[in-house]
Amino acid sequence: MSDFDYDVNLGKLGEEELSRWCTSSGLVANRSLEEDTMGWDHLIEFPYIKSDGPQDKQEKPIECKIQVKSTQRTDKGVNIKLSALKRLVDYTSPAFILFYEYDGLASPVLEHSYLIHVDKKLITRILKKIRQNYLLKTPKKLNKIELKVSYSQKHKLPENTGEELRGKIVSFVPDGIAKYQQDKHELTETVGYEDGGYQFHFKTSGNELEDYFMNKALGIVTSLDVKDAIMQDTRFSLDGINISESDVAKIEVFPETHDKCKLRFKTNHYSTSISFDAELVKVPSVLNGYNRLLFKANLFSIELGKMTNNSFEGIKLHETLDKKVSIEECIRFFKVFNSKNSGKCLFLEIDLEKKDRPLIFQFTMKHDYFDYSDLVLDLRFLQSSFDIDSSLQVHIGQLVQEKVRIEALCRLLQNDANGLDFRVPDTPENVMYKELEEVKHRFTSIVVLGDSAFGAITLLHARKAEDFVYKAYNSEILETLTFNDQIPTKELVADLEQQAISRLSDDS
């Protein structure tokens, strides 16, 4: 018998083996006509899954691409061109590498088969290798770069049959081909960006950035103007690629709330507390290298500086009085932040939701807030008199501006008109006022609180001080007025006054 000098074409042998497997298991194998350039050897089409439902509602059949690698080596790995692997990554349906291990005989016999799924781990390796090549000063063509793909016992098919191959492929598509394609597309777009994947470089001063972080946390500002801004893509934590540049730009950061808490202020350990809902925000410090702790309430925030010897250095008070809050919160603010407490040692309990025990310390804060204890009493009286909901939203500055009117309305409601003077116009038709020692004068007082208003129509009893000038000594309430979510016009008030006087005349 003659001996022949030849080498077995293992690649051809493997491709034919896969074709036989597919035919025997009801799969359709379409061979690639482009050798070693498209990244796959066979496009495998599955039949429809049996269903009792209408055919127009049948689930889409699975399809996948397989690259076959045949070897007589036992080192469990093959170098594959990066261009071929990229094709498998960019293919949105399942992609596999099928390894056929043949024995070393002259007429090779298939011993083992291994199926590698192009999954997240392999996709990450492939795309990272591609990015690394791109970052080189002289990048190579992808078909000149190889990546070793290894396999092990966990990839081994139990039997060398088409049925085993078919079942293994189906196991990677548990939710159908449409869901698989969606998930793979999202994976290829996001892998390597798990830790952000972008860097933003810009120029600004440390002091400006320091102030911006704090003011943003307080809600005072929105953005910061910076110069020489560069956005870089740093996928896989590699060197950045510039994707946009600008001489000027605006940046905006979003502080993270680490916990919610209650701030309780006391004059001593056992006194009644005045509490506020707040949030703990950690504000970075670019100059000092530590996070600044900010306990942020609606109307104010307390910044705790660096902690030393179980106390905090540099406690600061930040005000945000332009916010609209409940009238109840305004009253509590007036109670804590007044001239009596400025510079006085207070106790602060910080009760964090995520901590079992409150943080307690003594502190002093100097500020220039006035004493509004009289205003607090008047607001409480108005709440009681008009049944004002404590959640009514107001600006604290509005309460201060309305302080005189609030006090006047409270006094009128208690029939106290002392100090109220009024002048009658010196006209011919009012000449009789020269002879009158006592008069009754219609007077309406309106106080605006938030988007609502409250008031009273009164009849002032007054004595003559001089010609045409009278001093009130008593007030008679004709009508109390509540305008929910409405600020009355002068015309409406005048009309209500006339109605009240008419009813008084009728009663008389």
Image (cartoon, helix red, strand yellow):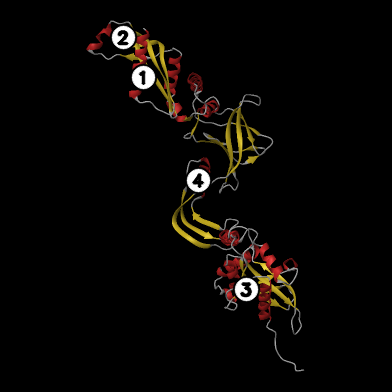
Q: Position of residue 485 (x, y in %)?
A: 43, 29
Q: What amino acid type should be assigned to the residue bearing mark 2?
A: Glu
Of mark 4 and mark 1, the one earlier in the sequence is 4
Tag 2 residue:
466
Q: Secondary structure at mark 1?
A: helix
Image quadrant in which the C terminus is located: top left
Q: Quadrant of residue 115?
A: bottom right
| Residue wearing tag 1 | 496
Q: In this rendered view, identify the residue nearer to me: 234 or 336.
A: 234
Cα distance, mark 4 to mark 3? 62 Å
* Image depth: mark 1 or mark 2 in front: 1
Q: Earlier in the sequence, mark 1 or mark 2?
A: 2
Query: Residue flagged by tag 4: what amino acid is it?
Result: Tyr
Label 2 – label 3 distance at C-alpha? 114 Å
* Residue 77 place in picture, x, y as percent: 70, 73
- Helix or strand or loop: what does disc 4 sit on? helix
The disc, 4 or 2, on the residue closer to the chain's N-terminal end is 4
Q: Which secondary structure lies at badge 2?
A: strand
Mark 1 is on which residue type? Leu
Q: Secondary structure at mark 3?
A: strand
Of 78 and 119, nearer the camera is 119
As measured in the structure, the alpha-carbon distance from the residue carrying label 1 to the one carrying label 2 is 31 Å
